[in-house]
Image: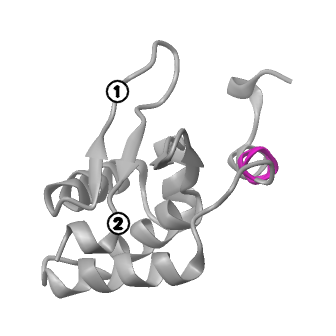
Amino acid sequence: MHRYQMTVEQKVRERRRALAHHILMPKELQGLIMLSYINTGTFTTKSVQVLMEILAQTRMEKGYWVFDGPISTLAFMAGCTRPYAKICVRKIAETGILKPGFARKGRTTLFLVQEADNNS
């Protein structure tokens, strides 16, 4: 089945299957980054949920923590709309936690996830 013909639930299952083959960010590091974000004072409940999903999907690639999931799937998993998830990602990036990497033709933008020590 082509990706455009899949339901959001099927896309979520596909994303989880794909992530199962990667080294994911440890929960302890996720917690430190989350604390760093909350300490900025610029968060909303939904942006925290979006960041939690981003961190849960962050994987190690070539020595960097990266997130490259589709925004529509991220929004569904965080319980918000796609436009609001895009706003949250932009606001999280403004805090320095996410750093836009590069866009790949036909693929989502890759974000580098900065470790908590870099954001303090």
Q: Quadrant of the C terminus?
A: bottom left
Query: What secondary structure prevails in the magenta region?
Result: helix
**Residue at the spot 38% in from the left edge and 43% down from the top edge:** 111
Q: Which mark is residue 44?
A: none
Considering every residue shown, the one lying at the far right of the view is: 1
Is residue 72 positioned above or below 113 on the image? above
- Residue 2 in the magenta stretch? The answer is no
Secondary structure of the residue carrying tag 2 is loop
Q: Could you say which is closer to the camera, residue 73 or residue 65? A: 65
Q: Could you say which is closer to the camera, residue 118 or residue 85? A: 118
Percent from the top left, x then y, of residue 112?
37, 47
Q: Quadrant of the N terminus?
A: top right
**Residue underneath mark 2:** 115
Is residue 45 shown left or right of residue 119?
right
Q: Quadrant of residue 50?
A: bottom left
Percent from the top left, x then y, of residue 56?
58, 66
Is residue 52 positioned above or below 92 on the image? below
Count every numbered label the image shows and give the total.
2
**Residue at the spot 22% in from the left edge and 66% down from the top edge:** 118
Percent from the top left, x then y, of residue 22?
72, 50
Disc 2 residue crowd, few under 14, some 14–19, many 20+, Cα 10 Å:
some
Secondary structure of the residue carrying tag 1 is loop
Disc 1 residue crowd, few under 14, some 14–19, many 20+, Cα 10 Å:
few
Between the C-alphas of marks 2 and 1, the distance is 19 Å
**Mark 1: amino acid:** Phe
**Residue underneath mark 1:** 102
Q: Could you say which is closer to the camera, residue 45 or residue 61? A: 61
**Residue at the spot 54% in from the left edge and 44% down from the top edge:** 69
Highlighted range, magenta: 13-19
Q: Quadrant of residue 23?
A: bottom right
Is residue 82 shown left or right of residue 101?
right
